[in-house]
Image: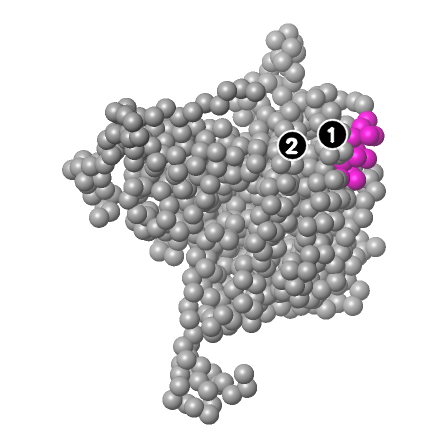
Amino acid sequence: MLTNKEVAEHIAEKFEGKVGDFEQPYGLLTFYTLRENIIPLLQYLKEHPTYKIDFLTDITGVHYPENTGKEFVVVYHLHSLINNFRVRIKVALSKDDLHIPTASELYPCANWMERETYDFFGIIFDGHPNLIRILNIEEMDYFPMRKEYPLEDATRRDKIDALFGR
Amino acid sequence: MKPVKMVEAPAGHSGAGFFATSFDQVIGLARSYSLWPLPFATSCCGIEFMATMGAHYDISRFGSERPSFSPRQADLLLVMGTIAKKMGPVLKQVYIQMAEPRWVIAVGACASSGGIFDTYSVLQGIDRIIPVDVYVPGCPPRPEQILDGLMQVQELAKNESLRRRNTPEYQELLASYNIQ
Amino acid sequence: MSDIELLPKQGQVAKKSQPELVEELTTLNLGPTHPATHGIFQNILQMDGEKIISSEQTIGYIHRAFEKIAERRPFYQITTLTDRMNYCSSPINNFGWHMTVEKLLGIEVPKRAQYIRVIMMELARIADHIVCNGILGVDTGAFSGFLYLMQKREEIYEIYEEMCGARLTTNMGRIGGMERDLSSTAIKKIHEFIKTFPPVLKEFEELFNRNRIFMDRTINVGAISAEKALAYGFTGPNLRAAGVDYDVRVMNPYSSYEDFEFDIPIGQHGDTYDRYMVRGEEMWQSLRIIEQAINNLPEGPYYADAPEYYLPPKDDVYSKMEALIYHFKIVMGEIDAPAGEVYHSVEGGNGELGFYLISDGGRAPYRLHFRRPCFIYYQAFPEMIKGLTISDAIIIMSSLNVIAGELDA
């Protein structure tokens, strides 16, 4: 049975200096790593003989407009089916330097997950085979999930905002 | 055994071996009882349409026996589900490809007005791009409500004059949607 | 076809011996509106005659921005959004969301409510598989089986109506339990369903399982190996058909699933026939779970003692002061949730449905992300249909059970 403490200690030792902020909210081991280290880290976890963390559950992004220098966070959820162990890895990116290497060579399922994150937040995944919008219309010129953009369509005429409490 | 209710014959003269009435009444009668729907099912309301098509709430009792997926052969465009802005041009193209006479039912809150999705990516009602005849509200509407909407279109079809499609009001309506 | 070489120019093949004969590949748009696709997504196929060479997908035709809407709404109002993701089995989505919030708030749901949730989730799973297998039958050309099964789906709808009032988009349950107890009519209907569903399902299986035509059309069509399936992020019946027995109900049990005894059917080749059989067998296992749950239903309250999040009963609101205050605070949205981030997943009809919730202490989530299984495994579709005919592509799409609401969210 893998425990959070064991895996955390091993990773902190192996990737010293490049990982940090270990915590376990609600029992799930979570830690931050640097952009340069994410692909070696994912590869290491996938090929590790006992951990076998080889199932990518999800990739998504979060926008924190108040954290200057670390506005965007890309979150990877991984799962080891053999050991029933889950882990969450985060990478913080700044808004002026918004790109990160792609995980789609390692995990083919990351392809559309990264496209969705690009579509919503504008995070560029270097090396992605086809980084275009996936859910929104192609002509859209802004990234809708960022906090500065409203939910409603800016061009609608018939919904009176006052009646809807806005 | 309950007595079977026969459909009333339209007003006209009958005699020995003949029945004379006006064209539009006969054609209206024929059209209204054989409306072939084009189920444009996009989301949850489409599943309620599947239930309407099933054996419990049979839609073929009302003449819609054959759901035609080809616009050229359909009379009735049933738009069921949310129409996103990405889907709008596709819907308009399907409507343009339909042959006259054609009616449109907007089934569900999303097709009528955008529903609960007041967002940047959802078209707030299909009447922004195509003319709609009957709106069936609900989220999703019960099959009985969809059948009620169909019955309203039947009334429209029965009472429509044959010249309606050439009238200037109708031409103006289509022109306002940029449909030739 | 050994004498065909691909010319450098896109879309043209030529026979080596007769270079002047240049054939072009046909482009076919299996477009957003198509009778055989259940849901709107587009596949542009490049075909050589009837054989598919490559395909390109476009999705997003029903993108409704759920994740952005969720940042605006308090927690109990997001349940209506989760209904509309996988709309064939909405109770599973609803309870998955409720369990995520209960994990965040640290609420312990009583046993009776958990058993009722299990019954509703398994009924939803049966309903989802009914639609998938029935429509797979329709796509191979056999319509009557679908009609027989849809009648059973009407009975499931009646049970939902007893429980929550709606047929399809159920908005079932509340944070902390259920909104009402199982009424005696509901219990009677569930017992009747358990008795009358097996003969219908058996009849449906007799039509299809050993049917020569069905087997010829589905065996070895769209096969995917277990390694590839895991690489593409498959979960749920599609992964189990490829041979991997990963079921969230067993691996990370939630809502008392560990009390029930059920098997997990797995297939061997991951082709369409295996997916069909896995879903059929899962319906039998779900029926087993429902039977165990309804026969061993424990007594007790049907909601947790969490007055800050669960609306107090109406007679208390009218008579006691604190109940009135709690009711007011909950309805006006003034109760805040603790800050934190939680990921919870349930076994949806199509696989692991995950909810990643980041709360910043306000009344609405800061960020909510849905891990939707359909979105993830649909990426493998172009690879599964390479080299097959278009009718095979339609059957593979049906057997994958791609639901557009979950694809785009």
Is A141 situated above or below B141? below
Q: Residue furthest front?
A: B16
Left or right of residue B83, residue C183 in this image: right
Q: Residue A91, percent across and down?
A: 58, 57
Is A39 situated above or below C16? above
Q: Which residues are magenta?
A: C287-298
- Res. A158 in view: no
Q: Are marks 2 and 1 in contact (CB under 8 Å)?
A: yes
Question: Residue C192 bears which disc, if any?
Answer: 1
Q: Residue C275, percent across and down?
A: 68, 56
- Res. B18 in view: yes
Amino acid marked by disc 2: Glu
Q: Residue at x 50, y 59 (%)?
A: A115
Q: Quadrant of residue C356?
A: top right
Q: Residues within 10 Å of mark 2 (few under 14, many from 20)?
A: some
Q: Residue at x 23, y 42 (%)?
A: B174
Q: Residue at x 79, y 22 (%)?
A: C300
Q: Quadrant of residue C296?
A: top right
Amino acid marked by disc 1: Glu
Residue position for label 2: C155
Q: Residue C297 colored magenta? A: yes
